Image (cartoon, rainbow, N blue to C red):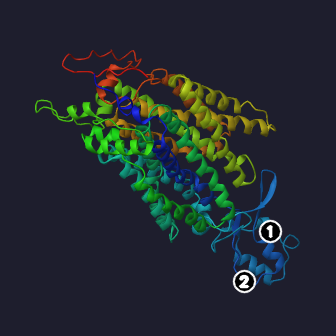
């Protein structure tokens, strides 16, 4: 009987020096993704602003009165997008009239800000909004900038997953890291909004693709509790650390270009990790490159100071030399939909990932209401994720995967529904519900990454996680416009997100369980495993000609 990969490398131990080095370095490589995911919170923030008044011959009274006053939320503020016609005001000033005494200023005709805007520097020295004047008639460019960034992440997730299955986990990990580092640096030199957004899309190609490559690489190298700790806690803490460091850097660097440089240049120290992070032995075995896989495992044995067997992957050596009548089965994205059960599982996972992403980013981008200070708001939003990731780790270790995901979705749905029932004036309760809702969504997000990697075989694992991540990015792409629905009702986004979460919880009931089972190595093992509970799909019988490898349940 053929041994599973964890059984074959069990002599290494679960958390020796080799595993510790891989664990720490991969977690560090994820930190820049925490920076990148929410950088636009500060880069694209809009300071208070009003029309610029050129240096013309106006009395002091008329210079103060040339900007109309509006009442917003019970407070008087200067108009952001209009001023009184400057030629009329200048003529009245030259004739010696006084505003409000001699002239009813509110009756004057208004015009757009033809000479640009003056932006407050109380919070920021500059943002891309002040740099490229993304206000008034061009205000639509601000949410579009966020959406186009997530489109880049979407495309990167789609292609990087397939490339990683074809070219290897390690090359894609460092290629995506190089992509986001280089283009984050080049963005500093953008001379127009169009140039900035094009570079932002390319930057987005490497963002979460890097996270997924690191997640899969670590999940395939590590085994047992070390793999569980890495998939559910290590990667997520690396992301949260980057998230929390972002507002700290932004607080001291109020200029958007300085912030971009501070977030891109330190990533250069990660490239020497190439010589310390190995390729996935599982992937190498899947490609028939047994000697390379053995070399990595023997090096790990030396680092852990244990003796390796004379032949480590003997079963794989036999399998890697198939007869001419048994050609190697090619794998592609079509395998995810070619089988009814696998296709149904992929569809559910994609929908749940979409819901998790929309909820996560929707609540995260809405946390500016937490505190008047944007830096404090962002830090609190990041800090909430730490207990959420601890909860996901504990759940992955002791609780059914299916039950854990369902519980997080139900809790999020209930809290999001309850927000609309909070009486006006109870802002503290409102914000508490929103943050506990984010805790639930984040817990589910942490669970889903590990859950998805455990459901697919090695040949399709990165492609599958890439596809699910791609669909999840569709949820993040709609977030800026979903939040715009607050103009119709302040609770409408919460109702939509709560409904999506409730439906996702029901759909998760139909997924197979992976708790306590080894990672599948082939598509045949998925078909042999507990069938998906879909009443419309009959349980397929195993063809007699197909040999199924039986793996003991851990």
Where does the image place residue 487, in percent across and percent down from the top left?
65, 45
Q: Residues within 10 Å of mark 1 (few under 14, many from 20)?
A: some
Front position in the image: 289 or 167: 289
Q: Which quadrant would the C terminus be assigned to in this image?
A: top left
* Mark closer to the chain start, 1 or 2: 2
Q: Residues within 10 Å of mark 2 (few under 14, many from 20)?
A: few
Rendered image: mark on residue 105: 1
Front position in the image: 235 or 15: 15
Q: Residue at x 65, y 60 (%)?
A: 250
User: Can residue 133 be seen by looking at this rendering?
Assistant: no
- Compared with 420, 37 (above or below) is below
Where does the image place residue 479, in percent across and percent down from the top left?
55, 44
Left/right placement of residue 30 relative to residue 424 reads left
Residue 452: quarter of image: top left
Where does the image place residue 209, in percent across and percent down from the top left?
43, 48
Front position in the image: 18 or 495: 18
Q: CA distance from mark 1 to mark 2?
A: 19 Å
Where does the image place residue 124, in percent across and percent down from the top left?
68, 65
Left/right placement of residue 161 relative to residue 227 reads left
- Residue that mark 2 sits on: 56
Left/right placement of residue 400 relative to residue 51 reads left
User: Can residue 315 be seen by looking at this rendering?
Assistant: yes
Q: Which type of secondary structure does the marked residue at label 1 adopt? A: helix
- Compared with 478, 60 (above or below) is below
């Amino acid at each position: 009987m053929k041994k599973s990969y964890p059984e074959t490398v069990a002599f290494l131990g679960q958390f020796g020096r080799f595993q510790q080095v891989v664990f720490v370095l991969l977690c560090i490589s994820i930190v820049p993704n925490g920076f990148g995911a929410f950088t636009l919170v500060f880069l694209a923030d809009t300071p208070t602003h009003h029309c610029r008044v050129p240096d013309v011959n106006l009395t002091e009274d008329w210079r103060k009165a040339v900007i109309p006053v509006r009442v917003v939320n019970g407070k008087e503020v200067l108009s952001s997008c209009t001023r009184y016609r400057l030629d009329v005001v200048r003529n009245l000033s030259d004739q010696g009239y006084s505003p409000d005494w001699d002239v009813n200023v509110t009756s004057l005709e208004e015009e757009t800000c033809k000479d640009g805007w003056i932006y407050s520097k109380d919070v920021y020295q500059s943002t891309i909004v002040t740099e490229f004047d993304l206000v008034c008639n061009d205000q639509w460019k601000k949410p579009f900038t966020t959406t186009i960034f997530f489109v880049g992440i979407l495309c990167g997730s789609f292609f990087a997953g397939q490339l990683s299955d074809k070219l290897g986990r390690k090359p894609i990990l460092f290629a995506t890291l190089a992509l986001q580092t280089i283009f984050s640096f080049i963005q500093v030199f953008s001379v127009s909004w169009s140039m900035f957004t094009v570079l932002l899309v390319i930057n987005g190609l490497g963002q979460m693709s890097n996270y997924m490559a690191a997640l899969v690489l670590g999940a395939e190298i590590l085994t047992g509790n070390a793999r569980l700790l890495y998939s559910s806690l290590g990667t997520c803490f690396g992301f949260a650390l980057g998230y929390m460091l972002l507002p700290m850097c932004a607080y001291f660097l109020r200029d958007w270009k300085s912030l971009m440089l501070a977030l891109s240049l330190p990533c250069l120290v990660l490239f020497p990790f190439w010589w310390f992070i190995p390729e996935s032995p599982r992937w190498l075995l899947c490609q028939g490159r047994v000697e390379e896989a053995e070399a990595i495992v023997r090096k790990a044995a030396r680092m852990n100071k244990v003796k390796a067997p004379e032949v480590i992957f003997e079963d794989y050596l036999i399998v890697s030399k198939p007869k001419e009548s048994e050609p190697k089965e090619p794998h592609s994205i079509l395998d995810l939909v070619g089988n009814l059960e696998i296709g149904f599982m992929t569809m559910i996972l994609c929908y749940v990932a979409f819901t998790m992403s929309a909820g996560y980013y929707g609540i995260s981008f809405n946390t500016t209401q937490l505190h008047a200070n944007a830096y404090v708001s962002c830090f609190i939003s990041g800090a909430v994720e730490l207990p959420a990731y601890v909860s996901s780790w504990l759940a992955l270790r002791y609780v059914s995967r299916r039950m854990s995901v369902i519980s997080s979705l139900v809790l999020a749905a209930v809290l999001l529904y309850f927000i609309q029932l909070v009486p006006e004036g109870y802002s503290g309760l409102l914000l508490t519900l929103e943050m506990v809702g984010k805790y639930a969504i984040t817990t589910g997000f942490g669970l889903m990454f590990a859950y998805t990697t455990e459901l697919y075989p090695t040949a399709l694992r990165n492609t599958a996680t890439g596809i699910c991540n791609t669909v999840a990015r569709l949820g993040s792409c709609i977030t800026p416009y979903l939040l715009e629905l607050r103009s119709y009702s302040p609770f409408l986004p919460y109702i939509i997100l709560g409904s999506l979460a409730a439906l996702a919880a029901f759909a998760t009931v139909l997924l197979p369980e992976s708790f306590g089972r080894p990672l599948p190595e082939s598509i045949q093992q998925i078909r042999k495993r507990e069938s998906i509970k879909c009443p419309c799909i009959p349980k397929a019988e195993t063809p007699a000609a197909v040999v199924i490898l039986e793996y003991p349940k851990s």
